[in-house]
Image (cartoon, rainbow, N blue to C red):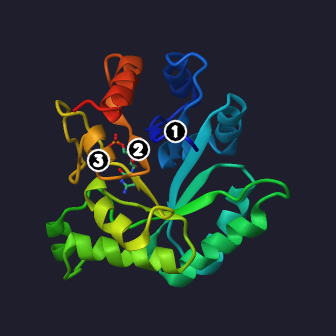
Amino acid sequence: MDKPFIVALDFSSKEEVWSFLQLFSDTSLFLKVGMELYFQEGPTIIDELKQRGHHIFLDLKLHDIPHTVKRAMKGLAKLGVDLVNVHASGGCAMMRAAVEGLEEGTPPGMKRPRCIAVTQLTSTNERMLHDELLIDRTMNETVLHYAKLAYDNGLDGVVCSAKEVPLLRATFGSSFITVTPGIRFADDQADDQVRIVTPNQAKQRGTNYIVIGRSITKAHDPYAAYERLKQEWDGGQ
Ligand code: C5P
């Protein structure tokens, strides 16, 4: 998990995945498999990606009763992925159950997948927080509170917007990882994302990993877009 860039494989079939990855020749990437791809292709896609040398963030955002989450995580741990996640809003017992399930399911000699919690989706803004979720706090207070629940219950980090990373760093230190979607190049569309930043802004804020999807997958030249991402991260805009 050394690369700070996680490319979201938001495709619905293996064929689309292979034609996308062909553009990167043999480069080993850190890839995010989400619901769209996993629900179509199942565990075999994970195995095939791993055999090609890629690292995997399995982004299924579990949110259910603790018993169900524990058993689901036990199964996911067997896939040998690097990173999985839950929604922090599932509560403390559910988050502890997720980690227990991963520990039980990790085969001997393998490292247990790291488990992170989604604080608030990067497509959520303050108005939605107040009017739809009836949360009467600011976004920062809410993200900080959910992150504290994750931290106190043994999770390895959180998914949040890069905008919130400095606050989380100051509170939980550098070993609690932050994974931040909502990344766009300065000249990109926001699409359905709301709390967005550029790759370099995310780096300046101290994030560990950025998740980037459409800015690469839908680019005219995805390989060039990935190279631009690396350049901007290393000191561009
Ligand atoms: O295309 P885009 O860069 O917006 O893709 C972002 C990816 O990150 C999507 O796969 C989305 O499901 C995921 N994600 C997110 N916000 C979160 C957690 C995951 O956008 N809080």
Specify which label sits upstream in the sequence, 1 or 2. Answer: 1
Marks 1 and 2 close (CB-CB < 8 Å): no
Count all numbered tags in the image, as a single digit. 3
Q: From this viewpoint, is residue 65 visible?
A: no
- Report the mark closest to the observer, 2 or 3: 3
**Which residue lies under the disc numbered 2?**
211
Q: Amino acid at mark 3?
A: Gln
Residue plotted at (33% across, 45% down): 203
Observer-nearest of 122 and 109: 109
User: Which numbered disc flags the more N-terminal residue, 1 or 3?
Assistant: 1
Q: Nearer the viewer, mark 1 or mark 2?
A: 1
Q: Where is mark 1, residue-wise?
A: 3
Callout 2: CB less than 8 Å from ligand 1: yes
Label 2 to label 3: alpha-carbon separation:
15 Å
Can you give x and y, in whole percent of width and height, for residue 16 in the image?
A: 51, 25
In the image, residue 103 sits, relative to residue 28, either above or below, namely below
* Category of crowding for the residue at label 3, using alpha-carbon neighbours closer than 10 angstroms: few (below 14), some (14–19), many (at least 20): some
The three-letter code of the residue at mark 1 reads Lys
Viewer-side label of 1, 3: 3
Quarter in which the N terminus is drawn: top right
Left or right: 16 in relation to 214: right
Q: Who is closer to the viewer here, 88 or 186?
A: 186
Location of the C terminus (image quadrant): top left
Of pointers 2 and 3, the one earlier in the residue sequence: 3
* Residue 191 appears left or right of 47: left
Left or right for 193, reference 231:
left
Residue 218 placement: quadrant: top left
State the residue position of label 3.
204
Q: In the image, residue 168 lies at what x, y percent?
A: 35, 67
Query: How busy is the neighbourhood of tag 2: few (under 14 within 10 Å), some, or many (20 plus)?
Result: many
